[in-house]
Amino acid sequence: MRRLLPVTDMTAHETTVGGTAAGPAAGGAGGGREWSLDELADAYAYPELSSEGSWLRANMVSSLDGAGQHDGRSQPLSSETDMRIFGTLRALADVVVVGAETVRLEGYRPARAREAFADRRTAAGQGPAPVIAVVSASLALDFSLPLFTEPLVPTLVLTGAAAPPERVAAARAAGAEVLVAGDGAGVEPARATAVLAARGLRRQLTEGGPRLLGQFVAADVLDELCLTLSPTMTAGDAQRIAGGPGVAVPTRFSVASVLERDGFLFTRYLRI
């Protein structure tokens, strides 16, 4: 894996991330040393936060022609290195925020504890694994799935005050904790991030889907985008990585880093 940006005096010597991990360098088709998971974690570390601050990061993948998924799932656009970065981003987060449709389409399971990150999470005051927080207005979820019945830490459900009472009861009966983050049926993005931060879940990661990410963008609460540009083209009419109503003025981001491996670009953008 090669690091393309930021350029440092080490960039020319940092090559492949290989099959085990990625790190400050990302690489091309040739050989080279593998990045350790610690190096990857350092490269994607959250910024220092104030006692009441929070940081919302998104992790998404896109084809060259703008598709955020293929046949309804992101996996066909991904790669082994992309999945290693995916796992690292999860391991650094306090909470993973995901939309109900993505839970259904991607077959979400509980986050797991990973020994490689155990010391880092302990030092950061984190539990063994991130909390999964599912955003849903209708709560039309299958509460018999392992995400709700077998989590290492209880799954959260974010919904609005007008959510169907019987579905709220079903979620709680399954062991999920229901948090209200909106006055109506749906979730208000700014309320969602604030409710999670109030629980100490301040390092926030969203994995979409496109509708949820679009809501975060429209509400101007997204701080960072980690975008994998997949060297694929899909044509068709697949969704982009963010959907829903547009913003009046495009939100500007600055590029923080670019890594490369096997033609995949792993980028980080920070909101200006």
Image (tube, rainbow, N blue to C red):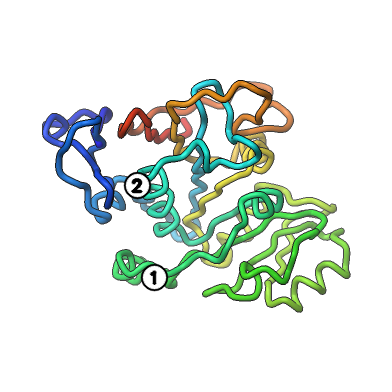
In this rendered view, identify the residue nearer to me: 160 or 25.
25
Residue 142 marker? none
Residue 44 marker? 2
Q: Position of residue 186 (x, y in %)?
A: 79, 51
Q: Position of residue 56 (x, y in %)?
A: 52, 47
- State left or right for residue 100 relative to residue 269: right
Q: Which residue is mark 1?
A: 125
Q: Are marks 2 and 1 in contact (CB under 8 Å)?
A: no
> Quarter holding the N terminus?
top left
In this rendered view, identify the residue nearer to me: 1 or 29.
29
SS of the residue under disc 2: loop
- Report the mark closest to the observer, 2 or 1: 2
In this rendered view, identify the residue nearer to me: 186 or 261.
261
In the picture shown, does residue 105 fall above or below 262? below
Residue type at tag 1:
Gly
Mark 2 closeness class: few <14, some 14–19, many ≥20 residues within 10 Å: some
Report the Cα–Cα distance between label 2 and label 1: 18 Å
The residue located at (26%, 28%) in the rendering is 4
Residue type at tag 2:
Tyr
Q: Position of residue 168 (x, y in %)?
A: 81, 69
- State left or right for residue 79 relative to residue 138: left
The residue located at (44%, 35%) in the rendering is 228
The residue located at (45%, 56%) in the rendering is 90
Dot 2 or dot 1, earlier in sequence: 2
Q: How many marks?
A: 2
**Quarter of the image holding residue 118?**
bottom left
In this rendered view, identify the residue nearer to me: 83 or 52.
83
